[in-house]
Amino acid sequence: MSSESQRHQQESQRQESQWHSGGYGGPFTGIPFTNDDARFALPRIVSFQYIAAAIFLFLVVSYFMVQVRDGETNSLLAERNRVKTVPILAPRGKLLDRDGRTLVDSHSAYSVMLSREGFKEEHLAAIADGLHMAPQEILDRLKHSASRPRYLPVALKQELTPAEIAFVESHSDPATFPELELVESHRRVYPRNGMGAHVLGYVAEVSEQDLNSEAFAAYAQGDIVGKAGLERQYNDRLVGKDGQTRTVVDSSGRERQVLDRIEAMPGTDLTLSLDLDLQAVAELALEGQRGAVVALDPRTGEVLAMVSRPAYDLNIFSNHVSADYWKQLTEGDANPMLNRAIQAQFAPGSTFKPMVAVAALETGTIDENYALNCAGGANFYGRYFSCDLKTGHGHIDLHRALVESCDVYFYTVGNLLGVDRMAQYATLFGIGKRTGIDLPNEAEGLMPSMQWKRRVQHQEWYPGETISVAIGQGAVTVTPVQLASAIGGMVSGGIWYKPHLVKGADVGPPRRANLRPENIAAVVDGMYGVVNEGGTGASAHIDGIELSGKTGSAQRVSNELRKSGKLGKKELLDNGWFVGFAPRQNPEIVVAALIEGGEHGALVAPIVRDVVKSYFDKKLRLAPTTTKGPAPAPATPPIALLGSESTRVPARVLAGVKP
């Protein structure tokens, strides 16, 4: 190797050695590095590497979350940003009478919905003015719906007027109020003049209090639900399933394409046990009164008619109830919101005597020939108890005691029987217990006993109290439906079916009691005499129909309050009761009627007579005939005939009812 080549190799080795020892800045700079420079650069390079790795890891994780884990959710959110969902409200099911005639239906109306996603605060005043709403009312609706997904619209107002419909149609364009949407809805149509008001009930927008209850947990603000009567009891069956339409909208809110449409499913129609003809007769009979009428078929428990008066207009509740009308309903002592048929709790008076008679016969306390002398009153436990006939009934047995309603006879029998045995049988018949009828908020009445007084009043029972209970006074109270059920089952031989309002409903097996037929027959004979042998219920007599029954008069106020002079003459009048059934054997119908302040059961008996007669007239009219001829006329004429001379029921009662 030449000397020149050796020198070149040695120089290269020397430069490489200096490079590794930090003597040069690098092959490109020609600037030498010191050891201090190397120690300063290395940590910065390492930090940069860690930061770069962290950023890369963050990007990878974010990509995974957006594209993989939350991909479906994000796709749905993106879809909602461009797809508008509008509900199709389902109509509620109809309520039909037992013959298929429409009692309650729905008609088309319009509601307005508000999209919260597109709502602008500056639009509030103008929208409220156009819909005749207070701005705060709109804000409250938005607040109550805050827990729902924002893409779901909020119902602002139901049953829009023509002017309000025009406002929404003309202002819901993308340039004005795109958050407004006009939706077809359904408004309930009820019979007029309060017919069947307490039985049928009404619907209204679900309240905040309702939403806090378990029964309405599945509903949302703006939904329409049953609030009373059958509308409330069978709300889940009557309500349908809403549908919806989905449309693609652009950034300005203009509809570009209909994606799909799911039709609404109407609610289920309910065929009731009510007979429209009997209902109309009972409604007319109670017009202008405070009271109730209940007609049952004791063979099945089906309610054929149920009336409570005074009543209220259901059609007002299906829209918006004004403050003045609500005040009219809730103030004063008339209390039209009270369903007196199942909630009025009053002493039954002498209608209780047949139950006392059965209890005495069944326990062997007396037999049907037991007799005594009535001199117009009797002393019991140091107190004189007067009879309803001040001159007395003279020598009287069980049959005459029922026919003429002798108080002294039942004072004596009740005293022999004792309050606890009276309570045992009365409770067996259903007194002091809810019947279980398919209506909300039924009252249970009261059947007192020694144990009841110790438990509730923390006092011992006084023997003198038994005397009052024996004639249906004192602490004992019943509701009209309870009285009808108790008497109907008793005279049917001790078989009580649960009262119900849906035709053919399965209410389970009846309650039964082992009552001796001869004892039932003795009491039924006495009740037959009440109507057909010149008794206290003679005004209920119907030629050709074996109507039996019992009158009753019961004090509404205590003797002390009566003597105080604080009450007016009308408030001092006794309640009038009458309970009747027909035919005499194997009864098909039992009717209980109450008139508050009716004074005497004899004045109430014609109501029961008219309902029972209507039942048998219709039965005869629809009975098959062996001779050829025209088909029998329908029980209720078509709407076109209502008000004509051929109409059996006045049009003012049936107005709003469809054939």
Image: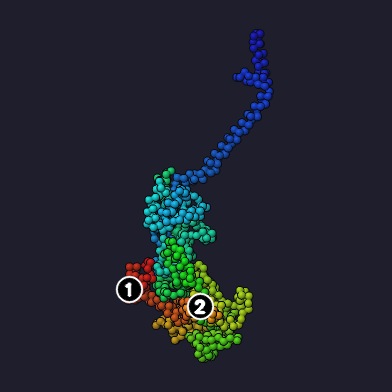
Asked if 13 appears above or below 464 in the picture, the reply is: above
The picture places residue 173, in percent across and down from the top left corner, at: 39, 48
The picture places residue 620, in percent across and down from the top left corner, at: 38, 76
Q: Can you see residue 500?
A: no
Q: Which mark is residue 646?
A: 1
Check disc 2 and give the amino acid type: Leu
Which residue ends up furthest to the front in the rendered image?
565
Residue in view at x 47 percent, y 72 percent: 334
392 or 424: nearer the eye? 392
Q: CA distance from mark 1 to mark 2?
A: 46 Å
Residue in view at x 42 percent, y 69 percent: 194
In terms of image quadrants, where is residue 367? bottom right
The quarter of the picture where the C terminus appears is bottom left
Residue in view at x 46 percent, y 74 percent: 290
Residue in view at x 43 percent, y 81 percent: 540
Check disc 1 and give the amino acid type: Ser
The picture places residue 472, in percent across and down from the top left corner, at: 53, 80
> Is tag 1's residue or tag 2's residue first in the polypeptide sequence?
2
The picture places residue 633, in percent across and down from the top left corner, at: 34, 72
Q: Position of 636 compared to 483: left or right?
A: left
Name the element at disc 1: loop
Name the element at disc 2: loop
Q: Which mark is residue 567?
A: 2
Q: Which mark is residue 156?
A: none
113 or 364: nearer the eye? 113
Q: Position of 177 compared to 34: left or right?
A: left
For label 1, the crowd category at 10 Å Cα-Cα, with few meaning under 14, some 14 to 19 and many 20 or more, is few
194 or 72: nearer the eye? 194
For label 2, the crowd category at 10 Å Cα-Cα, with few meaning under 14, some 14 to 19 and many 20 or more, is few
Asked if 57 appears above or below 172 in the picture, the reply is: above
